[in-house]
Amino acid sequence: MRSTSRPVILTGDRTTGALHLGHYVGSLRNRVELQHTHQQYVLLADSQALTDNADHPGKVRRSVMEVATDYLAVGIDPSLSTICLQSALPALAELTLLYLNFVSVARLERNPTIKDEIQARGFGRDIPAGFLCYPAAQAADITAFKATVVPVGEDQAPIIKQTNELVRRLNRQIGRALLPEAKALIPTTGRLPGVDGKAKMSKSQGNAIPLSASDAEIATAVQRMYTDPNHLRASDPGQVEGNVVFTYLDAFDPDAEAVAELKADYRRGGLGDMVLKRRLTGILQSIIAPIRDRRSELAADPDTIMDILRAGAERGRQVTEQTKMEIIEGLNLFRL
Ligand code: TRP
């Protein structure tokens, strides 16, 4: 069914809540394209979600179905992509434990992604050990699928770098290039800001537009959007840079020329925020409506989703068990 000569992609999301428009522009949209040219595995990273959610296992569990529903609703097609539940693939956990012997605590602590998180959340020495070690776990994910392309946000680039260090270390120990190095595929479109203008759209910040948003919710979110605080009257010249409505139009409006004209009008003065917001509302509603409808159809049929997850796990187990055996043999470890 799939050509094995296609480059292998591994991508995925921590299951910590339903996905939103930020995920849609940053990754989901690309996955729908890439599944036609690549052998794509999409990981529901529930084990990784637990590394900083040990207090919220219920959230992690419930989010598995939520995120799976989002995947299918945006058009990730289980006949083209394999959706894998991380916790259903024991080889990933086994490889993680093995890989932890090939990396030092100092190196894990130096990982910029980890360092930033320790800082941002004030973990200090109380960082959960699983969280500190998640770069090794992600290296296990990536190598178990022998993925060479890993689409991730910019903040994840250091994880891929560390994965490749582990790949080289393991290959050196094994004595041949058993595992391929992976390339991070970072989206060229910048991160979508929250509706409040904060740098990142995030459910926990309450500034996200979920893929299940109703037309009214979309309208309200756009209404609240940050524009130019000095643009008090329509006749005033307005600023486009840092204006969230324009950032969103750049990301979603299919008519780039029209957006360029609107920007010129806005700068000149004479174009009101309301006109822009009405345009953006219509565009977002037309993008989200089919996703939302598909989402509710799917949500009404959880058995079908479960079947897709079971089939994906089955396929994922085959691939990851195979790689695990190759590594064990490569390292010449004892086998009963
Ligand atoms: N760490 C990724 C994120 O937070 C999720 C993830 C887990 C992942 N395993 C992966 C992404 C493997 C790509 C490949 O977004």
Image (cartoon, helix red, strand yellow):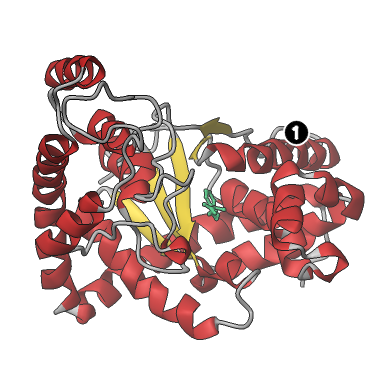
Taking 308 as reference, is 10 left or right? right
Please state which of residues 59 and 271 is positioned toward the viewer in this rendering: 271
| Image location (x, y in percent) of residue 66 | 32, 71
Taking 232 as reference, is 241 left or right? right
Residue 310 in sight from this viewpoint: no
Please state which of residues 99 and 68 is positioned toward the viewer in this rendering: 68
Describe the element under mark 1 as helix, strand or loop: loop
Please count the marks in the image. 1
Q: Is residue 288 above or below residue 314?
A: above
Quadrant of the image occupied by residue 238:
top left
Quadrant of the image occupied by residue 250:
top left
Q: Is residue 224 above or below residue 164?
A: below
Q: What kind of residue is marked 1?
A: Arg
| Image location (x, y in percent) of residue 2 | 29, 43
Taking 94 as reference, is 253 left or right? left
Residue 110 in sight from this viewpoint: yes
Please state which of residues 123 and 227 is positioned toward the viewer in this rendering: 227
Residue positioned 76% across, 54% down in the render:
119
Question: What residue sits right under mark 1 in the picture?
Answer: 176
Q: Is residue 157 above or below residue 333?
A: above
Residue positioned 76% across, 64% down in the render:
97
Residue positioned 64% across, 79% down in the render:
54
| Image location (x, y in percent) of residue 49 | 56, 68
| Image location (x, y in percent) of residue 90 | 59, 70
Q: Residues within 10 Å of mark 1 (few under 14, many from 20)?
A: few
Asked whether mark 1 and ligand 1 are closer than 8 Å, the reply comes as: no
Residue positioned 14% across, 71% down in the render:
296
Please state which of residues 100 and 125 is positioned toward the viewer in this rendering: 125
Quadrant of the image occupied by residue 256:
top left
